[in-house]
Amino acid sequence: MTDTASQIAILNQAATGCILIAEDQPDVSEALRLLLKGAGFKTEWANSPARVVQAIEQRSFDAVLLDLNYARDTTSGEEGLDLITRLRGIDAILPLVVMTAWSTVDLAVHAMRLGANDFIEKPWNNARVIALLRKQIDLAVDARKENARLRMERFDADEAREIQRSLLPTELPQIPGIEISADWLPARGVSGDYFDVIKFSETRVAFCIADVAGKGMPAALLMSNLQATVRAFATPERAPRELCEKVNSILCKNQVAGRFITFFYGILELKTKSLVYCNAGHNAPILHRHHGSFARLEEGGPVLAEFPEQVYEQGVTQLGADDRLLLFTDGVSEARNAAGDEFGEQRLLEVMAAHRGLGALELRRKLLQNVHEFSELPLHDDATLLVLAVL
Amino acid sequence: MTDTASQIAILNQAATGCILIAEDQPDVSEALRLLLKGAGFKTEWANSPARVVQAIEQRSFDAVLLDLNYARDTTSGEEGLDLITRLRGIDAILPLVVMTAWSTVDLAVHAMRLGANDFIEKPWNNARVIALLRKQIDLAVDARKENARLRMERFDADEAREIQRSLLPTELPQIPGIEISADWLPARGVSGDYFDVIKFSETRVAFCIADVAGKGMPAALLMSNLQATVRAFATPERAPRELCEKVNSILCKNQVAGRFITFFYGILELKTKSLVYCNAGHNAPILHRHHGSFARLEEGGPVLAEFPEQVYEQGVTQLGADDRLLLFTDGVSEARNAAGDEFGEQRLLEVMAAHRGLGALELRRKLLQNVHEFSELPLHDDATLLVLAVL
């Protein structure tokens, strides 16, 4: 059945209104039947917990009026409490209105904590029974609609994430003399983070990382736009600062106030290990030299999508054997722990220093492991890590 | 206050639990106070409808126990019913538990339809009162969290829509000898539809329309990606079929199974009014000749993003003075009425024929008006219309 068809079925049920009376006393059941009939409800009767479960599994009801005490034991309410738990396992929304002559605070609270929607004492007040049933049935119709909407949203969100994932490199290219490893972790279903690795030839590779201001769907739309723009204009001949200028000028035409983008783009000559890069307002990548010192790749200019006709500079650096380069977004460095402290860039440097010998994959995992151990929370921002290891 | 701060405040309230007792009888109020204190609740007392409203406006409560009858009139419940309406206007979620000694079916149903959450008869059962209050407070905490989530989502959706809108031409270019008018109507917040008009020079203009399979966020991400790709590769020198081949080959690299795109792209030479186009699986645009005949622009090939290395054909047609060209997505032609019938392409032709003299703007409006009058429903799919009128 489609969502729409099942929604229409639910609406029709609400109009006709069929109540299951779960009650072992025939006279009580009959009195309820007459009351409910007078108010326009249909009823069915099940006189034992087993028959109640069977009825609920076999067809749809709009609500259940549920006695807590059946033949086995007529005052503790345990049979009824078990039944509530079983029915909730079958249907999370179906209104369950408990009726009992033996109400105590504990029993009432217990029944409602287990999932009963309301609680009626015997002997009941007719007005209350009808009013509560109508209210619970209305609430359940709303809840089922909301559930259907959420299911569709979740389905959409899963697909959106899959599409975003497909915009990133599915496999990082094999590059002689370099090891590359990356993680892309959206805080919500989709992300404003982007990274890419483009192998122009056996001797030249470009890589980039970016962070669109904000999170979620708005950021993801711009990330998707950025990916296509970078892929279109990143060519072996175009210098990093020219690429930044080109991408910036295009993004500035899509005027979205306040949605700037930080971006880092570099081209590595594999023979000479010379890295030419442009940093457009992004957290400066960390270059950990094999002899232990650190450098930060900061040359470039301001963020993208803010200043039309911005001119960018570029930096050049020489990578050496066993150097490690870390590109990251602020979801990594600004991960917070329960006390509100940031992981911070200093800790990134410390983890890199403590694990100098590791390859790209292991270093990337070690960094992320440290971030997770520090924050012990789901990340509050999109996080991306890209590690290059020179062999 | 930020969303997070207000959520924490709500959680703290739930832990302490402060109930407003709205009741004009001091002895009843005192009995309730003692009962609730024993169950761990704080209480405040307001002995008239005016004081209840004042209290609710001034500070936060976790629930209200609400007498329906005050001094003015002690049995009809009208004062209490008015009060429910007023309180619901102030706070849509605050649990309102009505208490009355004068219950009838009508009054109970009425109170709950107006927004009361539950209904307790006097004299009350202690167990019931405590159980119901706890349940209603739990439900309200959940509802406030859900509300905060929905507010954030709505904020995100509004921003996403604004971003998408910014990817479309904000103003259509002024083009000598041609009038262009367009509508872009997302079925949900965002859309899989795309159109563009690119003025290469005073003598050459390109225009396109596209429809990504699906709706909502997944389709919107690909629409954003497509926009950047088209803008990057649409140049005055690149023939329409080459553009389609280029865009197709790039989209095929972002492998998302089933997410094909229909696309139409044309370049119009303004001096000669010669239109070269390529139709990649899109609903064939309708060319309404000034002498009354119709042509459909069908040359091209299959949809984009499905067949890597696909070769496309292109068509050429000559526009004449007073010709009208309609580009549209299937959200227009497949708009349905309540009976499930489609508007259909035949009706598009009929509307165009019936309004031959109109300019681009008026014809576009007339077409949309007819679609809306036919369907009388919100559109179930993204809809886009682009009308060109040759002067």
Image (cartoon, coloured by chain):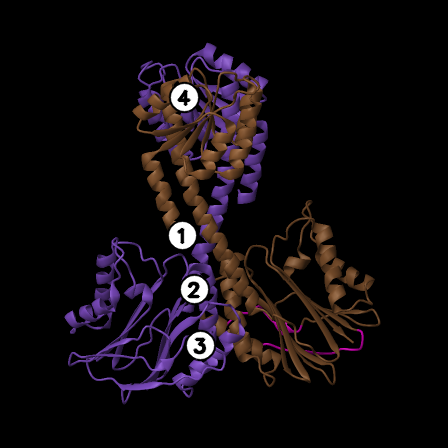
Chain colours: A purple, B brown
Q: Which mark is residue B29?
A: 4
Percent across and percent down for residue B293 are: 81, 69
Q: Nearer the viewer, mark 2 or mark 1?
A: 1
Q: How many marks?
A: 4
Q: Are marks 2 and 1 in contact (CB under 8 Å)?
A: no
B290 w.r.t. B115: above or below: below
**Between A34 and B252, which is closer to the camera in this rendering?**
A34
Q: Are marks 3 and 2 in contact (CB under 8 Å)?
A: no
Q: Nearer the viewer, mark 3 or mark 2?
A: 3
For this view, does A88 lie left or right of residue B259?
left
- Chain hosting mark 3: A
State which tag comes first along the sequence, 4 or 1: 1
Residue corresponding to mark 3: A230
Q: Earlier in the sequence, mark 3 or mark 2?
A: 2
Q: Position of residue A257 (x, y in %)?
A: 50, 68
Question: What kind of residue is marked 1?
Answer: Thr
Residue at horizontal 30 percent and vertical 17 percent from the top = A76
Query: Is there one chain holding both mark 2 and mark 1?
Result: no
